[in-house]
Structure formats: C-alpha cells, structure tokens
Image: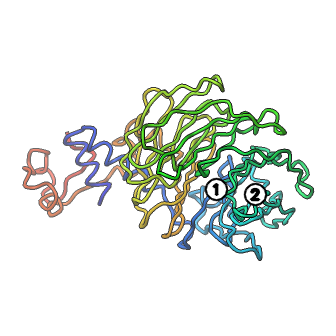
Amino acid sequence: MARVLGLVAVEIHSDEQTRAGLIDTMVGMGSDELTPDPSGEVVLSDDGRIALTGGDEMSVWDLTTWLDPKIVNKSDRIAVLKDRREGLSMTALSGDGRTALIGGGGDTVVWDLTDPAKPIRAAVLAGGKNAEDDDSVQSMALSRDGHTAVIADLGRDLNVWDLTDRSHPVRLSMTRTRDSSIVSDLRLSADGGIAVISYEGLFNDGAVAVWDLSDPSRPVKSADLALPAGKYARATAMSADGRVILFGNAHWAEVWKLDDRSRPVRTATLDVPLNDMYGMALTPDGKTALLAGPSDSGILWDLSDPSKPTRLAALKGYTREINSVALGADGGVALTAGPGGVSLWNLRDLAEIVADPERVACRVNPGTQISKADWDRYTGGADWSDYKGEDLPNALAACAIR
C-alpha cells in the first residue's frame, strides 16, 4: 500500500517530498531481517559477503544467499566467535574479511577468518600500561589486509599492532594521544597509514584529530579539525584513501577533505534530522555515507561532490533505534543493527531508484492499481474522474495516471 500510495502521489504531483517518499518505500522493499537478536555492533567485509553481528557473542554470516533474490532459503549464521572474557562487545573486521578483532575489556582477541565457517582464535593483544584505567578498549580499527591494527584505550593511548602473523602479533608503538579527553571513535585508512580519532571532553566538548601512521612505530598527529563551539563528534568515518573524513553528532555532520594531511579542509555541513548519532559508515571511495541514531531510520547521503552533499534515501522500517551501521565497498549492501535485531538492505538498484522512482515502481509491478475505496480514504476527497478514474469504476491504474 505504501508503494501504491507513493506512486500515485508522484504521478499526481511530483515534488521533492513525494519523490523522497516513493524512493524510501522502494528502497525499503529491498530489506530483509537478518536476525531478530539484539546487536550492538555490525561490521561488513568490503565485498559485502562476510558480516559480524552481536555483542558479547559475535555471529559470523555469509550473506551470499541473502543477496541473491533467486535463492529462497537464506543461510543461517555460519559460526560464532566465543570467548570466556566478559565485556568483549567491540568489533573490527579487515576489508578482505579474513581478520577480526573482538575487544572491549582489557584485552583484544584476534580471530583468523580465512575460513569464516571455521574461525580460529589466533592471539590476544594485551591491554595498555595504565592499570588505573582498566586498559578498557574504546575503539579499534583494521587495515584492509588485516596486517595493521590500531586500538585506542581508556588510558588515552593509541596502540599500533603488526598482525602480519596473526598468531604472533607485535606491538609497534603506544602513544599518548590526548590528556583531557577520551576517544569516542577511531577510523583507519585502507593501508593503515592514516587514522582519524574523535574525542569527547569532560565538559561535553570535543576534538577530532588526524594521525599520520606512515611510520607505525612513531605515530604523529598531523592536524586538528575545528569543531563547532560546544560540539563533539560521537561517530566518525573515513574513505579508503584517507582523503574524505566524515564525523558528526546530534543534528549535524561535517565533510572534510584531506588531500594534504597537515591541512584538512571543511567542504560541507550536513543538516541531519537525528537527535543523536550512534553509527556512521562511508564507502571506500568516500561517495556514499550512511548515518543512523536513536530513530528507526538510517539516512543515505551522496557525497560524490563533497561540497554539495545530497540526501539519497532513508532506510525505514526498522522497529527500534539503530546503534551500528555498515556499508559494502560499492554501496550495494548495508546493514543496520540495534535492540530490534539486524536488517540487511540490498541497495544495488539505489541509483536507478533515485534517478526515476516512478519507472522502477511501474517496472516492478506495471499493473499497480489503487481501489476507489482506498482513493477516497487517502486522497482527502480528490476528484476520481480527474485522473481517468471513469475508465475503471472500481480501480485506477497508477502507472497510467497523467
């Protein structure tokens, strides 16, 4: 019914509002419930095939069957990453999907997912040196090949690890990043050479900094990004090459270009209709962003022109707040997770839907009709005959409205 009403609205009066409504509905038709189990974290490999979801217990999923509409019987999770430690609820996954980090307490567990159905617990990364801070992990990230891990702890240290041999990790450096703030989010470029870190201060103020990790044994802060007064960035995202940075919080987000690591440039500010920001994802090319928070919708943005971001669609239909989001490398698949479970969104037709939602809607079901009863119920008394309703006394062919 939402699709029928949206199509009729666009056919009768095409404007920004009616088109956005139809686009959101058409995008929503490509969603599935991956699992109803609550999930505080969700991560996705670049090819959109391997996903990790959950909290204290992380489930491993192969999404191959989920992304093929011809396959009716979708596969269940293929493995579970279990550990006796408590509080391991934070996750990072390498772009190639072969290495995972599970952390949150004093230590971080390294998992080998070369065969995702048979994960191997490869090693444990010891916590930092500040016992008074319990060495709790605040945020973590992996390079695309999984050879470099960067972990920020509650002691405000940035730990860089070499995971080339996953069973024998080597800590390359431990660097104090900031004295008066704790890390709220951390992202890493695909090659592990650039990190962007957002901080939350004691008085609800914050900062965002760029760190040069080209020499991982000696990380160097290369720039601070100016934030609006009284603001801090809860969520952060970075393109694979490290040249596009996105961060934000309640009602706002900013896009920055980092062509020169020492001279970041703000290119745009997004007016985001979210009361808070819990999750943020960016495709490796930096052209598509997904933002989410306490509402039941995630919002997709087109950042192809970093100076002129445009809203693409809202991922609606989720039943609870969204805590975590993930995007595949080509933007063709998205995951949203929270207390209501995990939803998978097939976005492979997104560009076509945004360009011409009426055409896509009529191609999906060219015989779409609205009944006379529904017309009277939803249109507020609009004249049925004005839209050739007299040719079909009890139904109106939506795709034939002129």
Which quadrant does the N terminus fall into?
Answer: bottom left
Q: Secondary structure at mark 1?
A: strand
- In the rendered structure, the answer to whether residue 114 lies left or right of residue 243 reads right
Q: Which mark is residue 43?
A: 1
Q: Between marks 1 and 2, how big is the CA–CA gap?
A: 10 Å
Residue occupying image coordinates x 70% and y 51%? 152
Which three-letter amino acid code belongs to the residue tagged 1?
Val
Circles 1 and 2, Cβ within 8 Å, touching? The answer is yes
Q: Is residue 183 visible?
A: yes
Q: How many marks?
A: 2
Helix, strand or loop for disc 2: strand
Residue 100's disc is 2
* Residue 81: percent from left, percent from top: 75, 69
Residue toward you, 299 or 268: 268
Could you tell me residue 402's position as x and y percent? 19, 39
- The foreground one among 387 and 24 is 24
Please determine whether, in this image, residue 257 is positioned above or below residue 313: above
Q: Mark 2 belongs to which amino acid?
A: Ala
Q: Position of residue 86 (x, y in %)?
A: 70, 74
State the residue in front, 215 or 189.
Answer: 215
- Nearest to the observer: residue 104 or residue 307: 104
| Residue density around tag 2, few if under 14, some if 14–19, many if 20 or more, within 10 Å | many
